Image: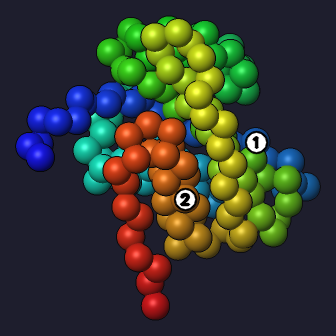
Amino acid sequence: MSIGVFAETKIAILDFELKDLTLVPRIPAEIKRTASIKPLLETELKKADYVIIDIDPNSQKFADSGVGYLFDHHDVAANLGKQFGADYVLVGRLHKPSFLFAYLMGHLIRVSDAKLIGDYISEAKGPNQKLTIKTVESLAVKIDKTLDNRYLPPPPSK
């Protein structure tokens, strides 16, 4: 099998938004964790030869009409992806209902028809960075199963 067998799958990953429902919302550590998700996910998907399409933060902000807007409006997210030549757009959220756990949520939208083809939730218990990385790997597995099925997560560390 030659390298050229797989067509390049181009995916744009938008900056994740933080939806923090705790009594002390948006603490610096949570904002930092939320900001770390996109680059971690891009790194994992690159390992499976996905082409990562960069959408600059200003373009994302321009398309976004408020918290949760792109998450709920797949047509707008798809149009944003189309402007940058992506096949798929992942709109993500870190949903934190409690201090004990949070959910990494993602909507995978096919740009060609603005259809939601993946609705993912991965649970992260605690704010630990290693757990965040494992949760991102879990999300990468789910995205890859929907798309090309070629991502192998790293083995569990001892």
Nearest the viewer among 12 and 7 is 7
In the rendered image, residue 15, in percent from the top left (x then y), is placed at 52, 35
Q: Amino acid at mark 2?
A: Ser
Residue sitting at the far bottom? 158
Q: Label 2 to label 1, Cα distance in Å?
A: 20 Å
Tell me the tag on residue 156: none
Q: Is residue 37 visible?
A: no
Disc marking residue 138 = 2
Residue 41 drawn above or below residue 114: below
Q: Position of residue 26 (x, y in %)?
A: 73, 49
- Of the residues tagged 2 and 1, which is closer to the observer? 2
At 46% across and 11% down in the image, what residue appears? Answer: 112
- Secondary structure under the numbered disc 1 in the rendered image: strand
Residue carrying label 1: 19
- Residue at the image position 78 percent from the left and 52 percent from the top: 96
Name the image quarter holding residue 114. Answer: top right
Residue at left offset 46%, top offset 79%: 156
Identify residue type, mark 1. Answer: Lys
In the image, taking residue 144 as reference, residue 29 lies left or right, namely right
